[in-house]
Image: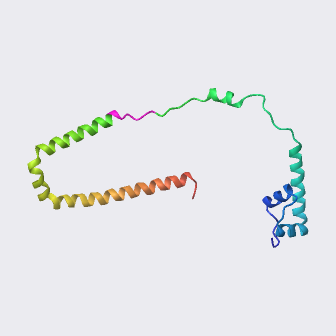
Amino acid sequence: MKGAHLNDETIQAIALDETYNDPEATGHMAGCETCREAVESYRLMFSGMTEMPAAGFDFDVKMLVLPQLQVQRKPQPALKPVLVIIAVVLAALTGGGYYFRKDLGEIFNRSLPYLLYCLGPAAVMLLVLLLADMLNTHRQKMNRLEYY
C-alpha cells in the first residue's frame, strides 16, 4: 500500500470475512490504526444490520401501482397511403417507359455527358449534407450523454 490506506471495498471484505487472506492488506492493517478502526466500525455496522428485523409489507405494491398505469400505444404508421404512392409512381414509370421505348436509348446515349455533369455535383452535395447531418446527430447524442 506504501503509505496509502486500504480502500473501502478491502476494508469491508476484511470486516465481513475473518479469514480474509491478502498479505499486503494484512501487513498494512498491522501498522495502521485508522484502517483497524474502520474495520471495527464496519463490523459493528454489519452486526447491527443482522440484528434488525426483516422488512415486511402488509400490502401488495403491484396491486396498488398497476391500476394507475395507463397503457400507451404508439399509433401505427399508415401503410396504405405509402403503398398507393409507390404504386402510382411505378405505374407512371412503366407507362412512360413503354410509350417512349423507342426514344429511351437515343435519349440516354446523347445526354450521358450532361447527365454526368448534373449527377456528379448532386452526389457530392448529397454526401456533404449527409455527413453534416451525421455529425449533428452525433453532437446531439454526446450532449445528451453530457460527455463534454
* 18 up-or-down from 95: above or below: below
Q: Which residues are magenta?
A: 75-80
**Figure quadrant of the N terminus:** bottom right
Q: Residue at x 16, y 41 (%)?
A: 95
**Figure quadrant of the C terminus:** bottom right
x and y percent of residue 137 in the render? Answer: 46, 53
x and y percent of residue 75 in the render? Answer: 45, 33
Determine which quarter of the picture holds residue 30: bottom right
Determine which quarter of the picture holds residue 82: top left
Colour pattern of the rendering? rainbow
Tally the marks.
Answer: 0
Q: Residue at x 15, y 43 (%)?
A: 96
The answer to whether residue 23 is left or right of residue 130 is right
Extreme-bottom residue of the structure: 2
* 22 up-or-down from 42: above or below: below
Judging depth in this view, the residue of 26 and 33 nearest the camera is 26
Determine which quarter of the picture holds residue 85: top left
- Chief secondary structure of the magenta portion: loop
* 118 up-or-down from 32: above or below: above
